[in-house]
């Protein structure tokens, strides 16, 4: 494939409701989009870095800088460009998986659109729709939380994930169980807010039959997660700690996780995400698709990935209207609690020109030849 250049486009997407986690509150999603332009087709990649380095070390301005300064020149040096070819040249730069994933996905999308192949087909999808869960932020009160959960259940979401932090953990879980019963699929996500010293407190979640507790301890505390897993009954799931297929294999070998959340941005792209799926499948460790409040472009790709065989738990693959009043693509909608996997070439969705223009705050064109 011959590339004409890359467009870096910054957009500001107001969230329909503030999203609060143990690491901060988000009112607006600050997104960097990468467009790979070729004579045949344009490809899109959504960078999932957030405006500040609170979820992981990356942040949007830093990702844009790494892309323009290191990743694009590395692509320019290749004689043939495709998603597999960019991976080893990006690997020479340490870290920055979200920046790498955005560029690799843009290249992959362009390549698949030219070939007329869907991303789901390329990755090995086996489903035409995937079950949708929803991630519910930390609220100001239990009644506010119960109202939010009630409306998500009424929309058809098949699994509820509660964001937790010290001071907002056992009580909200108990309240949701008391109000909505033991039947609903319920899990929690701490985004690294605890330490191993909190093990006894976290064991207080044991009676509530949670599917999993996601990333209770620090990103680099894999051994701590293995120790915690022996002290609580809720299965431990890792998000932040799983930075590669090797990290997944290590965490599984150490007994640090019984379940894995897969986010392509966190691991450098969809090729590595698929390898993590394969490693987990080989070990019988269930996986599910995480989310980073993506627009329709990133969502399309996540939904395609979630259609692989070993994605056995509902993902954070919610409908567009859970996040945005107006998405930049045709919106993803819930149908019986499921989101349909796009079937068109590449991501299978394209940005709406007017919707995109309305949220664009900056554009930058980098010509390659
Ligand atoms: O930890 O899964 C997370 C959003 C931003 C950063 C980290 C996380 C999340 C979510 C939301 O939980 C998932 C989604 O609906 O996109
Ligand atoms: Mg998480």
Image (cartoon, rainbow, N blue to C red):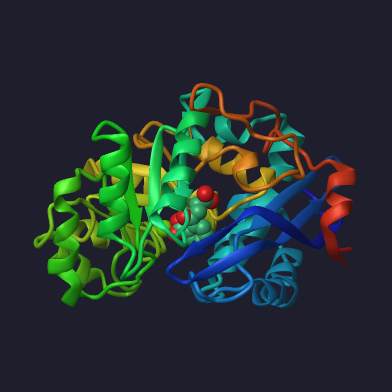
Tell me the quadrant of the picture where the C terminus can be found: bottom right
Front residue of 335 and 101: 335
Query: Which quadrant holds residue 301?
Result: top right
Q: x, y (%) of residue 170? A: 25, 58
Report the number of discs: 0
Q: Where is residue 4 in the image (x, y as percent from the top left)?
A: 86, 56
Q: From where the camera sits, is residue 64 visible?
A: yes
Q: In which quarter of the image is residue 122?
A: top right
Is residue 238 or residue 146 the one in the foreground?
146
* Residue at x 25% of width, y 61% of height: 251
Where residue 77 sits, quadrant-wise, is bottom right
State the image coordinates of residue 185 (x, y, percent, origin top left). Answer: 32, 37
Q: Is residue 91 left or right of residue 202?
A: right
Left or right position of 249 against 223: right
Give the quadrant of ligand 2. bottom left
Residue 137, percent from left and from top: 47, 56
Any part of residue 254 in sight? no
Please identify the residue farthest to the left as the structure is shown: 230
Residue drawn 41% across and 32% down? Answer: 158
Residue 171 in the image: above or below residue 349: below
Considering depth in this image, is 292 or 21 the residue closer to the camera? 21
Q: Residue furthest front?
A: 143
Q: Considering depth in this image, is 111 or 53 the residue closer to the camera? A: 53
Using the image, determine if residue 103 lies above or below residue 274. below
Q: Residue at x 29, y 51 (%)?
A: 173
């Amino acid at each position: 494939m011959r590339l004409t250049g890359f467009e870096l486009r910054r957009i500001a997407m107001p969230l329909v409701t503030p999203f609060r986690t143990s690491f901060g509150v988000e009112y607006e999603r600050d997104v960097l989009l990468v467009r790979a332009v070729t004579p045949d087709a344009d490809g899109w990649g959504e960078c999932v870095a957030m405006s500040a380095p609170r979820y992981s070390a990356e942040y949007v301005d830093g990702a844009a800088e790494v892309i323009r300064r290191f990743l694009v020149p590395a692509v320019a040096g290749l004689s043939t460009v495709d998603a597999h070819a960019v991976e080893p040249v990006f690997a020479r730069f340490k870290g920055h998986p979200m920046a790498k994933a955005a560029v690799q996905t843009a290249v992959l999308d362009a390549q698949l659109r030219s070939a007329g192949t869907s991303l789901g087909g390329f990755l090995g999808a086996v489903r035409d729709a995937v079950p949708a869960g929803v991630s519910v932020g930390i609220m100001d009160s239990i009644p506010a939380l119960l109202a939010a959960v009630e409306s998500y259940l009424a929309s058809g979401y098949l699994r509820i994930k509660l964001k937790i932090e010290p001071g907002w953990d056992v009580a909200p879980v108990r309240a949701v169980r008391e109000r909505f019963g033991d039947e609903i699929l319920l899990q929690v996500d701490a985004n690294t807010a605890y330490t191993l010293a909190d093990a006894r407190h976290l064991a207080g979640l044991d009676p509530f039959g949670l599917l999993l507790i996601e990333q209770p301890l620090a990103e680099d505390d894999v051994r701590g997660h293995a120790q915690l897993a022996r002290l609580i009954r809720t299965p431990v799931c890792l998000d932040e700690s799983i930075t590669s297929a090797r990290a997944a294999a290590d965490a599984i070998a150490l007994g640090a996780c019984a379940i894995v959340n897969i986010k392509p941005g966190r691991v450098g792209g969809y090729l590595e995400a698929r390898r993590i799926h394969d490693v987990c499948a080989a070990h019988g460790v269930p996986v599910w698709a995480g989310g980073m409040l993506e627009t329709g472009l990133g969502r399309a790709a996540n939904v395609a990935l979630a259609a692989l065989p070993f994605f056995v738990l509902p993902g954070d693959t919610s409908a567009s209207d859970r996040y945005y009043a107006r998405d930049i693509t045709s919106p993803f909608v819930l149908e019986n609690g499921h989101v349909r996997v796009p079937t068109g070439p590449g991501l299978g969705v394209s940005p709406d020109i007017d919707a995109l223009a309305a949220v664009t705050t900056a554009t930058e064109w980098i010509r390659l030849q």
